[in-house]
Image (cartoon, rainbow, N blue to C red):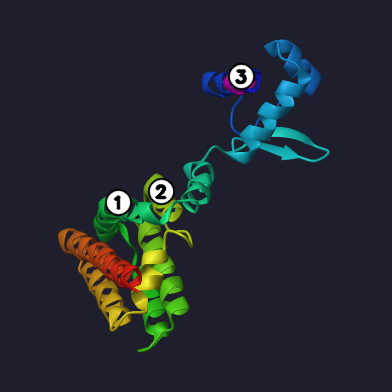
């Protein structure tokens, strides 16, 4: 593994130094291995590892290329890793959301377009008064993704998307099954949207903070009930 790590570092150094740029095709395997002082086996393992994290793109029959290295692409793996979290780590994920989502929502208040606002409103209207849990979770994902995208910060949006996979949305799914939780969630979404329409960044931030805190509280209450059974 140490040899493979060395191979990964050498390819990384080529990219960071500019010897390989986004979109560049890597030299032939034999040439690259010789140039880096590596065995072809260790080079293959390094290429495989870097392709898994979206740094390299292996195209069958065409060669291996450096990807665009855009943040949304590189941060895709965050969601994959986040889905393996343990139940006792959910509160930590929610704590991160409580930091990032209000910031993204405040940014979006100054940058979101009328078309994006209308799309968010239409998505909430399409839910109706009594959505199912699955419908509510799907809407929650789309609603917050739309806000993250409207923030204009691709790194922030990608981080939020990575923290919004099926597993990390468990608090919404569990909380929605209790009482009027669905109604409260929709109310919070509409208040966030209203603040965005007013271009009121601080109100948008406050409602986003309250929303994530509410999700956390509903999840904590549900967890306590499940433990008591």
Mark 3 nearby-residue class (10 Å; few <14, some 14–19, many ≥20) = few
Image location (x, y in percent) of residue 143: 38, 68
For the C terminus, the quadrant is bottom left
**Label 2 SS:** helix
- Most prominent secondary structure in the magenta stretch? helix
- Asked if the residue under mark 2 is in contact with the one under mark 1, i.e. CB atoms within 8 Å, the reply is yes
- Measure the C-alpha gap from mark 1 to mark 3: 36 Å
* Kind of element beneath mark 1: helix
Which quadrant is home to the N terminus?
top right
Q: Which mark is residue 2?
A: 3
Question: Measuring 46% from the left and 72% from the top, which residue is drawn there?
Answer: 138
Q: Look at 31% across and 71% down and name the residue there.
A: 228
Between the C-alphas of marks 2 and 3, the distance is 30 Å
Give the residue pinned by disc 1. 100
For residue 33, say whether it is visible. Answer: yes
* Residue 121 visible, this orientation: no
Q: Quick check: 223 left or right of 7?
A: left
Query: Is 137 in front, or is 111?
Result: 137
Residue 8 magenta? yes
Span highlighted in magenta in the image: 5-9
Asked if residue 187 is positioned above or below residue 78 in the image, the reply reads: below
Question: In front: 13, or 89?
Answer: 89
Q: Residues within 10 Å of mark 1 (few under 14, many from 20)?
A: some
> Sequence order check: which comes first, mark 1 or mark 3?
3
Of marks 1 and 3, the one in the foreground: 3
Per the image, the residue denoted by label 2 is 159
| Depth order, front residue of 8/63 | 8
């Amino acid at each position: 593994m140490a040899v493979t790590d060395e191979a990964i570092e050498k390819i990384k150094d080529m990219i960071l130094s500019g010897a390989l740029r986004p979109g560049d095709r890597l030299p032939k395997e034999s040439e690259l291995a010789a140039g880096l002082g590596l065995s072809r086996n260790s080079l293959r393992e390094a290429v495989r590892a870097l392709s898994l994290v979206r740094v390299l793109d292996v195209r069958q029959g065409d060669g291996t290329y450096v990807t665009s290295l855009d943040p949304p692409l590189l941060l895709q793996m965050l969601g994959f890793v986040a889905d393996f979290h343990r139940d006792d780590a959910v509160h930590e994920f929610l704590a991160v959301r409580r930091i990032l989502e209000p910031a993204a929502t405040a940014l979006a208040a100054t940058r979101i377009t009328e078309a994006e606002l209308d799309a968010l409103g239409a998505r909430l209207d399409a839910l109706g008064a009594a959505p199912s849990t699955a419908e509510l979770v799907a809407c929650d994902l789309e609603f917050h993704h739309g806000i993250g995208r409207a923030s204009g910060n691709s790194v922030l949006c990608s981080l939020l998307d990575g923290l919004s996979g099926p597993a990390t949305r468990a608090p919404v799914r569990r909380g929605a099954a209790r009482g009027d939780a669905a109604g409260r969630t929709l109310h919070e979404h509409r208040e966030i949207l209203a603040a965005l329409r007013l271009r009121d960044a601080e109100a948008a931030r406050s409602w986003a903070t309250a929303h994530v805190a509410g999700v956390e509280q509903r999840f904590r209450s549900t967890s306590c009930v499940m433990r008591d059974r």
